[in-house]
Image (cartoon, rainbow, N blue to C red):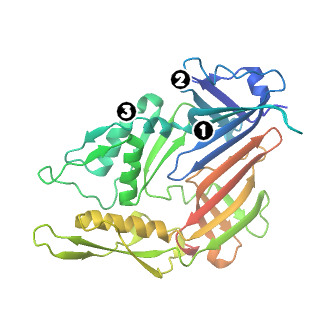
């Protein structure tokens, strides 16, 4: 029995629908996406029907094969993955198990992570302009940049220093995001063959229109929902920089995390731990403040959740970065959460999503 609520496209350059025999042999699909991380996928095919390793997935030249996965039908259809195949595995028959072909891949950030021999300079460019410049070269893959300027950013004078990139585009874009409290994610869609390269603060979902509302008392199609608060996660970061002229050490206060966006929780509990920002002495005051803001915002996300969602009928799947609302839970856990990670498991009989939630603060804002 084939998976009818999933469409698979594959090919070098422009992906096209896979042949019917390949689609019929598809036994299961796993897709993982997360805020600020590289997405991945795995396709499992039955080989008991004489299916060979399709040339659509592994060419004689060994080219990178692009794969598009579209989950759902009609208005509920969404591009769940746009990536490239990176490994192939064939397993022979075993006790109670038929021979299988397993194809694994990663999203298009893998293509951004291939050339580690890059050395590039960005004289007088703010961090967001550097990111925009790097992402522009991937328009040929259908990538559209959405780059949000950070609240704190230093624009170095050319006479003082010139920022340099050493390593891959992906590594440098991630490094710049981490330095100012932003995240970088490549979200497939909204149409096949296109992706949104988001570089900005989290959460970014529409707070006025949550993707899912969960009744904690009667969760319906949500199973095993757990909500948790870690009182020890949040830290108060400290930094001291060295003034190059006077050689005096200058303490830098940590900015309020709301500079990156209003927390999803009503009250953000205080930090119980102090932590010094490493290698801050050589930074400017603005660079140190941006690093403090990044550390404070990340550690403040101490309220989390975990559950399983059964996708049925025309229901839309959850996406990393979207917003979920929890109702009728204990007061501290009511309100909005960001979807931090989603793992889709799709077979002919079911579509299950394992999801992780996160937010800064307790209670509904």
Q: Which mark is residue 142?
A: none
Question: Residue shown at 61%/69% (left/top)?
Answer: 335
Which mark sits nearer the N-terminus, 2 or 3? 2
Which mark sits nearer the N-terminus, 1 or 2? 2
10 Å crowding of disc 3: few (<14), some (14-19), many (20+): few
| Mark 2 to mark 3 CA distance (whole Å) | 20 Å
Viewer-side label of 2, 3: 2
10 Å crowding of disc 2: few (<14), some (14-19), many (20+): some
Q: Give SS at disc 3.
A: loop
Q: Which quadrant would the C terminus be assigned to in this image?
A: bottom right
Q: Give SS at disc 2.
A: loop
Q: Is residue 191 above or below residue 12?
A: below
Give the percent coordinates (x, y) of residue 195.
Answer: 50, 38
Give the percent coordinates (x, y) of residue 200.
Answer: 42, 53
Q: Which mark is residue 63?
A: 2
The residue nearer to you, when weighing 335 against 321, is 321
10 Å crowding of disc 1: few (<14), some (14-19), many (20+): many
Is residue 189 shown to the viewer in this render?
no
Which mark sits nearer the N-terminus, 1 or 3? 1
| Mark 1 to mark 2 CA distance (whole Å) | 19 Å
Question: Residue shown at 53%/55% (left/top)?
Answer: 205
Give the percent coordinates (x, y) of residue 28.
Answer: 76, 38
Residue linked to disc 1: 81
Residue linked to disc 3: 137
Task: Give residue 136's quadrant in the image.
Answer: top left
Seen as rendered, the residue at the extreme right is: 96
The residue nearer to you, when weighing 307 against 313, is 307
């Amino acid at each position: 029995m084939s998976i009818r609520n999933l469409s698979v496209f594959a090919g070098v350059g422009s992906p096209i629908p896979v042949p019917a025999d390949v689609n019929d042999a598809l036994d299961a699909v796993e897709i993982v996406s997360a805020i600020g991380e590289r997405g991945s996928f795995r396709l499992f095919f039955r080989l008991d029907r004489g299916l060979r390793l399709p040339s659509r997935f592994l060419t004689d030249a060994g080219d990178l094969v692009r794969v598009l996965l579209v989950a759902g039908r009609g208005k509920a259809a969404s591009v769940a993955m746009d990536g490239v195949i990176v490994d192939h595995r064939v397993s022979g028959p075993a006790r109670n198990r038929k021979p299988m072909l397993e194809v694994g891949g990663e999203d298009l950030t893998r293509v951004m992570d291939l050339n580690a021999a890059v050395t590039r300079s960005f004289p007088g460019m703010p961090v967001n302009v550097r990111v925009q410049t790097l992402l522009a070269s991937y328009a040929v893959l259908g990538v559209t940049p959405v780059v949000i300027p950070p609240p704190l950013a230093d624009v170095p004078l050319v006479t003082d220093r010139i920022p340099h990139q050493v390593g891959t585009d992906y590594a440098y874009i991630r490094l710049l995001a981490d330095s100012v409290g932003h995240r970088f994610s490549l979200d497939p869609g909204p149409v096949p063959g296109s992706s949104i390269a988001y570089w900005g603060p989290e959460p970014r979902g529409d707070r006025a229109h949550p993707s899912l509302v969960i009744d904690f008392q009667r969760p319906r199609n949500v199973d095993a929902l757990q909500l948790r608060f870690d009182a020890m996660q949040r830290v108060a970061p400290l930094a001291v920089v060295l003034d190059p002229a006077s050689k005096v050490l200058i303490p830098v206060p940590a900015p309020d995390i709301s500079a990156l966006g209003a927390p999803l929780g009503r009250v953000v509990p205080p930090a119980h731990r102090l932590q010094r920002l490493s290698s801050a002495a050589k930074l400017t005051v603005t660079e140190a403040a941006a690093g403090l803001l990044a550390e404070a915002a990340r550690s403040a996300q101490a309220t989390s959740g975990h559950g399983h969602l059964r996708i049925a009928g025309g229901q839309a799947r959850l996406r990393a970065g979207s917003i979920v609302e929890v109702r009728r839970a204990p007061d501290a856990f009511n309100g909005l959460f960001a979807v931090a990670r989603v793992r889709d498991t799709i077979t002919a009989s079911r579509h299950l999503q394992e999801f992780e939630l996160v937010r800064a603060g307790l209670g509904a804002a």
